[in-house]
Amino acid sequence: MNIHEYQAKALLRSYGAPVSDGRVVLRADEAKTAAGELDGPLWVVKAQIHAGGRGKGHFKEASAGEKGGVRLAKSVEEAAEMAHQMLGRTLVTHQTGPAGKQVNRIYIEDGSDIEQEFYLALLIDRKTSRVSVVTSTEGGMDIEEVAASTPEKILSFSIDPATGIQPFHGRRVAFALGLTGKQVGKCVDLLGKLYKCFIEKDAEMLEINPLILMPSGDLKCLDCKMGFDGNALYRQPDIAALRDETEEDPKELAASKFDLNYIALDGEIGCMVNGAGLAMATMDIIKLYGAEPANFLDVGGGATKEKVTEAFKIITSDPNVKGILVNIFGGIMRCDIIAEGVIAAVKEVGLQVPLVVRLEGTNVDLGKEIISTSGLNVIAADDLSDAAEKIVKAVKG
């Protein structure tokens, strides 16, 4: 689960990390009052969406121009006008894709004097099962671009969970960034606070880009992105309360409410499968036969008729779906339950696209019988290869 910049900064502030003073604005008529509560003389107006590259992005609407989603204002009135221009409009960045994301929140904060910009992040390293620190002198840039062009400017190391964060970790970061004197101690202190926040809040990512060095010698987190382990939200009610459902794909949001593992993709063939491995294999073979999957959807081993029905509704709600492939291996999941769920869903939402069903395993004969006697226009398949070939042929003619 991701949160907005202003929420992440409030969290960092609660752990004692240095961030700028700011105000969140939900309505344009609140912007002038919010900006007036800050000292100035420079205000930073930031669009709040769950995507990076806001400063280099552009708004679809001509009235918002091509100024990007992060702007500098030199007066309260100018800050309010910028907030008014951004709210309710669609911001397109390299991370949102061409569709962009609607800006429903603006964050106005005090400007900062910048001497140097750095990159600092804490991430989960799946290979080592540890928290990794990633830092670079190239702050303010996309870390992917730095990794591709100047990888030698990136330092990455893991923290042993047996010892946790130690002062030498912070010194290692400080020396890599070229910090000296009292700046080193400030870096050690900051990394310790970030690590504490990361561990206690079950974070998956904490990215400060840029981390700035000010002329005073102080460090400040000028921007922050945070993501959290969705499986741990049951023990993080304060974090779960920060969820902004308007930033999530409506289909993925609906799936999460029924404990369905769903990820929207860009293809034309909707998939309903039980088991993550089988779902991956199904997507692979669809591509092998020349088409693209429209989603990853694992209904799980213990899905009910109701969950299958909801899964089918979610697939058919995607306008890009031109065909559906149901591929079930009945171990724990019974084929007759899947069949009943598919029939119930088709009767409720209708069937406007070709549907191929491949069933195998527990109660497979009963499942096939239920479908064959349903009167639905369903294409039966004998195995995975046969199913993929038939649905691709049905979609592409």
Image (cartoon, rainbow, N blue to C red):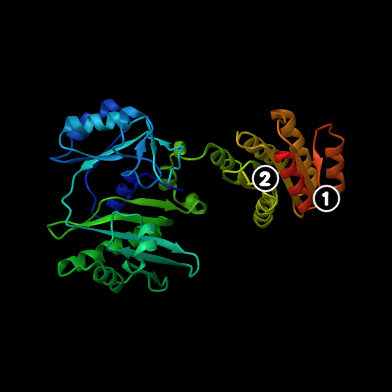
Q: Is residue 346 above or below residue 273?
A: above
Q: Which mark is residue 394?
A: none
Residue 339 image position (x, y, % from top left) = 78, 41
How packed mark 1 is, by other alpha carbons closer than 10 Å (few <14, some 14-19, many 20 or more), is: few
The residue positioned farthest toward the top in the image shown: 29
Residue shown at the point (30%, 64%) measured from the top left = 136
**Number of numbered discs visible in the structure rendering:** 2
Q: Are marks 1 and 2 in contact (CB under 8 Å)?
A: no
Judge whether residue 282 can be spotted in this image.
yes
> Of label 1 and label 2, which has the lower sequence position?
2
Q: Amino acid at mark 1?
A: Asp
Label 1, label 2: how far apart the Cα atoms are: 17 Å
Residue 254 image position (x, y, % from top left) = 57, 38
Q: Quadrant of residue 143?
A: bottom left
Residue that mark 1 sits on: 382
Q: Which mark is residue 271?
A: 2
Is 264 positioned to the left or the right of 75 in the image?
A: right
Q: Is residue 305 above or below residue 207?
A: above
Is 368 positioned to the left or the right of 173 in the image?
A: right
Judge whether residue 260 can be spotted in this image.
no
Residue 247 image position (x, y, % from top left) = 45, 39
Residue shown at the point (75%, 33%) measured from the top left = 344
Residue 171 image position (x, y, % from top left) = 26, 71
Residue shown at the point (21%, 33%) measured from the top left = 79
Q: Nearer the viewer, residue 387 or 235?
A: 387
